[in-house]
Image (spheres, helix red, strand yellow):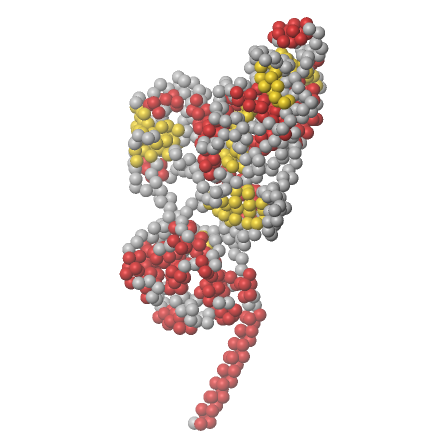
Amino acid sequence: MIRLIGYFFGAGAFLVLIAAAAAALYLGNLNKDLPDYEVLASYAPPVTTRVHAGNGELMAEYARERRLYLPIQAIPDRVKAAFISAEDKNFYQHPGVDLMGLGRAILVNVQNMGSGRRPVGASTITQQVAKNFLLSADQTIDRKIKEAILSFRIEQAYSKDRILELYLNEIFFGLNSYGIAGAALTYFDKSVTELTIAETAYLAALPKGPSNYHPFRHEAAALERRNWVIDRMVENGYVTRADGDEAKTQPLGVSVRRGGSHLFASDYFAEEVRRQIIQRYGDNALYEGGLSVRTSLDPKIQVEARRALQDGLVNYDERRGFHGPLKSIEIGGDWGVALGKLDALSDVPEWKLAVVLAVDEKGAEIGVQPSKDGAGKVGPDRVTGRISAKNMQWAYRSSEGNRRTARSPEGVVGPGDVIYVEPLESDGDYRLRQPPKVQGGLVAMDPQTGRVLAMVGGFSYGQSEFNRATQAMRQPGSSFKPFIYAAALDNGYTPASVILDAPFELVTGGQVWRPENYGGGSAGPSTLRLGIEKSRNLMTVRLANDMGMNLVAEYAERFGIYDKMLPVLAMSLGSGETTVMRMVSAYSVIANGGKQIKPSLIDRIQDRYGKTIFRHEERTCETCNAPDWQEQDEPTLTDNREQVLDPMTAYQITSMMEGVVQRGTAAGKVTLDRPVAGKTGTTNDEKDAWFVGYTPDLVAGLYLGFDNPAPLGRGGTGGSLAAPVFNEFMQAALAGTRPTKFVSPEGMSLVPVNRKTGMAAAEGDPDTIIEAFKPGTGPADTFSVIGGADAYVPPEEILRTSPQANQAVTSGSNGLF
C-alpha cells in the first residue's frame, strides 16, 4: 500500500511538474505578445474640440468620440462611488483581479449552464482598463489571461486613482459620448458636479450595455438597471437608505443635448471656423485634438445680423407672391403623425410647420406640428390655430408677382397643404410664411483689427449650408467704385476734380462696348464726389481709362478684393467676381485709415494642454513685461501692419461716401444717429443688390441675389434692397453705444467748393460743399474736365447742361474738350 501510494504520489508530482512546465511555457508565449502597459502613462485619448464665441459662450463641438478629459481630482466622490458599486465594489482592495468575485462568477455560470442565460463576467475596473486600452474585445481564454497578467502589472505601476481616472475617461456611454464628462453633458446637459444620485446611477448603469438601457427605446430596462445601481450604492454605504429610496422614485430625466452648434444663429459662423481649422491643422486635430477655440463672434451682433438679413430676404420674397405649399398630406385620420414626420427649419424656431385643416374666404384653420421627444417620436399634443385673411394677403400674388392670382385665402391654400406659419402675439393667431428663394450674405467686422463679429451665409443653414458670405462669388457692381476713386485720390486727383459724364464707346476686336449709367442719361462735367454719390458708370469708366487699368488692378489686389484682376476697362464697373468677406475687409482698410488687415474669425486656439498655438493679434509690445517700473513710459502696442492707403486718401473717400448716404443713391435708406459712409452696388440686369458701409467702429456689407443669378426685378437696386437691410442691422448693432466721428488727419485743409464745378466758392455762394484737400492741393482755379477727348457728345450739349462750363469756356478757360 505504501509503495502504491508512493507510486501515485510520484506520478502525480510528475504530472504536476509537466502541467507547471506547460503552463509556464504557455504563459511565457503569451507574455511575449503582451502590449506595453507603460503607454498608459502618456495616454492622450481623442478629446472633443470646443468652439466658443467672443464672450465665452459655447458655440460648437466637434468630435469622433465626444469626450472631455477630467482628472480624478475633478470627479466627485459620488460619481466614483456609483461606478465602483456598479462595476467593481472591491476596487480599492484587490490587486487587479478580484479572486472572490471570480469565484462567485464561476459558481453562478455553472449553475446557469443549459439555461440559455448570458455568462456572468467578473472583470474588475483594472481588467477593463487593460482590455479597453491594450487588448481587443475577443471573448477568448488567451485574451482573459492576458488581461489578468496586465491587470497585476498595471496595479503595480499605477495608483488606484490613476486607474479609475483612465477608466472613467475612456468608457463608452452610448449616443457617441465617451468619458463621464461627455456623458453628463450628452444625457443631462450638466457638468459632473451637478449630477444627482439618480442621474449618476443611470450613467453608471450604461457601460454594461448602452443600447440595452437606451433612455427612450428601453426606458423600463434603463430604470430597472439604474435602481439596481442605487441599491448597490446604498448597500456599500455610499448613499443613505432614505436618499436611495427617494432617488428611485425619480424619472430618468434624460434631456439629450443637441450636437453641432449650440449658440443660436451661429451655424454659418461655426461651419466656417470648422473649415479653417481643418485647412490649418487637419481632420484629426479638429475631431480628436481637444482644441479650445475662441472666436471673434459677438452673439448679440450675430443675432441682429441674422434678423436683418432674414427680414430683407422675406420682405423681397413676399412682394413676389406665394410659391405654393411645401407638400400635401392626408388629414382624414391623425394629421399630427404625418405632419410630425416632416422636418422643419431647425434654425428658424420662430416658424412652425402646419397643415391646413379647412379654408374659407375669411382665413384658414391649421394644425401645428406636434413636439417630438429625444427619439423623434411625435408627442400627443395637437395644437390648432387660424390664419386670418389679412395675415396672408401677400400670398394672393403668384410667384411672378401678379396681384390678381387670388382674391381670398381659398385661392391660396387648400386642406392638407403643409405650410410654414409664425405665431402672433394674440393666442391662436398665425401668419403665413414661406422660405424665400432669394438669398444673400452679410458680414460685420471690426475695422481696426479685422475681427469678424457676425456672419450670415443665407436665410437658413437648415435650408442651405452654402455660405454666401465666404463661398459665393458675385459681381460687386458699383460697390467696387470707391477703390477706383481711392486710386485716383492717391495719384494726383482730388474730390473736386471734374470728370465728364457723357456717353463712352470702346471698340476692341471689332466689338463695341457702350456702358451706360443706371437709368440712362448723363450729367455732363461733374466732380469725383458727385460721381461716387450718384454712382455714375460713365464717369467711373472715364476715370479708370484716364488712370490706366493696370493701376486700378494694382489697388484692387492691394485691398484684397481680387487675387489677380484682369486689367480691362469693364472691370472698373465691378464685373469681376469676389465675396462679401473680401469686400467688407477692403472697406475696413478705408475705415481704419489705410492699414492692411487680415480678416479673422478666430482670436485664439489652445491645444488640449492649454498651450496657445494660434493668436490673431499680431501687434507686439516689447516693454509690456518689464520686471519693475523705473519711471519709463507706459508700454505701447507696436502696429507693424502695412499702410496700403494714404490716411488722407482714406478720409477723403470716406467723406465722399458719407455723401452717398446723405445725398446719393442711399439717401433716405440709411438713417443712423452718427456719421456713416457707404456705397450701393447694383449689377447688370439687377441680378445682385449690394451695400457696404461703415462707422468708425463697425463695417458691414451684404448682397441679395438668387443663387442662380437672375434679375431681381424692377427697382432691385442696392439702394432699395440692400441699404435698408444694412440700416436695420446697424441700428440694432450700435444701439446703446456712443457715436463717434471720422477724424480728419492732421494737415488736411477743409475748403468750400462749388458742388458742380469743384472750383473754390466764395462765402454765400449757393450749392457749395466743404471739401477735404491734402497739403499742396486745392480747388482748381480754372474749369478743367478729365476725359473730354473720349466724349461722343456735341459740345453745345455739354454747355447746355452745365452753365458753369459755359461760363468757364466763354472766359477763356482751357481743357474742356
Left-right relation of 489 to 148: right
Rendering coords of residue 208 (x, y %): 40, 60
Viewer-proximal residue among 255 and 734: 734
The answer to which image quadrant residue 601 occupies is: top right
Is residue 739 positioned above or below 239 on the image?
A: above
- Quarter containing the N terminus: bottom left
Seen as rendered, the residue at the extreme bottom is 2
Any part of residue 336 in sight: yes
- Quarter containing the C terminus: top right
The answer to which image quadrant residue 248 occupies is: bottom left
Rendering coords of residue 811 (x, y %): 69, 6
Q: Residue at x 39, y 17 (%)?
A: 404
Q: Residue at x 51, y 71 (%)?
A: 156
Any part of residue 587 in sight: no
Q: Residue at x 45, y 41 (%)?
A: 263
Rendering coords of residue 120 (x, y %): 39, 66
Is residue 672 positioned above or below 616 on the image?
A: above
